Image (cartoon, rainbow, N blue to C red):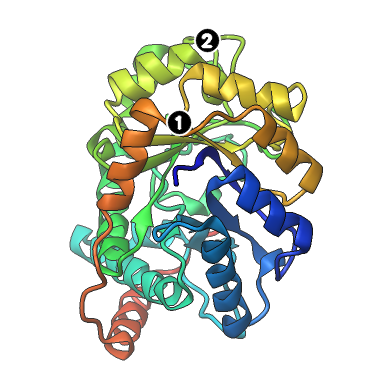
Amino acid sequence: MESRAFITGISATELNAAERAFIESERPWGFILFKRNIETPKQLALLVEELKKCAGRPEVPILIDQEGGRVQRLGPPHWPVYPPGALFGSLYDLEPALGLAAARVSARLIAADLSELGINVDCLPLADVPVAGADAVIGNRAYGTEPGKVAAIARAVTEGLGQGGILPVLKHIPGHGRATADSHLRLPEVNTSRNDLERTDFAAFQPLADLPMAMTAHVVFSALDPVHPATTSATIVEQVIRGVIGFQGLLMSDDVSMNALSGSIAERTRAIFSAGCDIVLHCNGNFEEMRDVAAVTPELSGKALERARLALASRRAPQPFDRTAARSELEALMSKAEIPGA
């Protein structure tokens, strides 16, 4: 049974009757989890299993934002705190091999946590390249300010996730680093020239164009499209994401309910598909909004379906892993650098 081209959140720590009926009738491609859905490992594993059962498909994408640092849906007392991305950049500046090793082993540990719960997709790595004066929404989540370094660390994170059987989602393509506003709250506008964007922001994503999935940025790039943010801009999707960057994998929107986007939820959803995104992401678990998204979301078909199938097929079984040794390795590496501030 094929699915519809959207990913949905749910409201609480277990499914209610309305959500079960919605999932069975509307057939979302996948699900995304947040702190409101999490209490204990046992509870979360049961919720994940129920989501998969309701979806009625053997391979259902279950997403989470588990970066480390400020963005970590799983945390104490049941799960460890992981370092922010900037720590890997700090170690990389001491010696590239240190930064890459820390990024890889941290991601491998995260993958082990997720795999035990039945979660199979992490919204990681970031390839955003922040600049001075940008909003702190990215801040120390970023790996650095030089595109080659950012791409190298992002690749190491991807490798660590892959070794643990977890699929990555590259974000926030084509770049959120220059944004002077938090797109959760309002629409950021970047007034940088195309040449500078290609040299810095877009350049960090180009070496990662082979990744299976990516998430868009709700950011206006006035030099390319002065009206529409990347998520709803056919110009940016076609010319930049698919063109300059060369990303050919499954392209999902960032959360359709964020305040950076305008119009009703249905209007936003239509605009996302019109721009060329393959999947709409809806996160907040608001049931009325979930229904509005589903009402205007097409069946997953054509190139989007092919990309979705290829993305899931790229997932590999977890490799043998000594968690205790990996934790010791990460702690030893972290001790060599101070954790940078936001």
Q: Which of the pair 57/7 is nearer the observer? A: 57
- Find the distance from the CA under tag 2 to the CA under tag 1: 20 Å
Q: Which of the pair 141/258 is nearer the observer? A: 258
Name the residue located 37 percent from the left edge and 24 percent from the top edge: 241
Residue 326: x and y in percent read 29, 82
Q: Amino acid at mark 2?
A: Asp
For marks 2 and 1, give the one nearer the viewer. 1
Q: Amino acid at mark 1?
A: Asp
Q: Which image quadrant is residue 129 in? A: top left
Residue position for label 2? 225
Residue position for label 1? 278
Name the residue located 71 percent from the left edge and 65 percent from the top edge: 15
Is there any visible trace of residue 342 in the rendered image?
no
Residue 191: x and y in percent read 54, 16
Q: Which of the pair 44/328 is nearer the observer? A: 44
**Relative side of 23 to 314, left or right:** right
Residue 159: x and y in percent read 25, 59
Q: Residue furthest right?
A: 288
Assess whether mark 1 and mark 2 are in contact (beta carbons under 8 angstroms). Answer: no
| Quadrant (top left/top right/bottom left/bottom right) for the C terminus | bottom right
Name the residue located 38 percent from the left edge and 70 percent from the top edge: 111
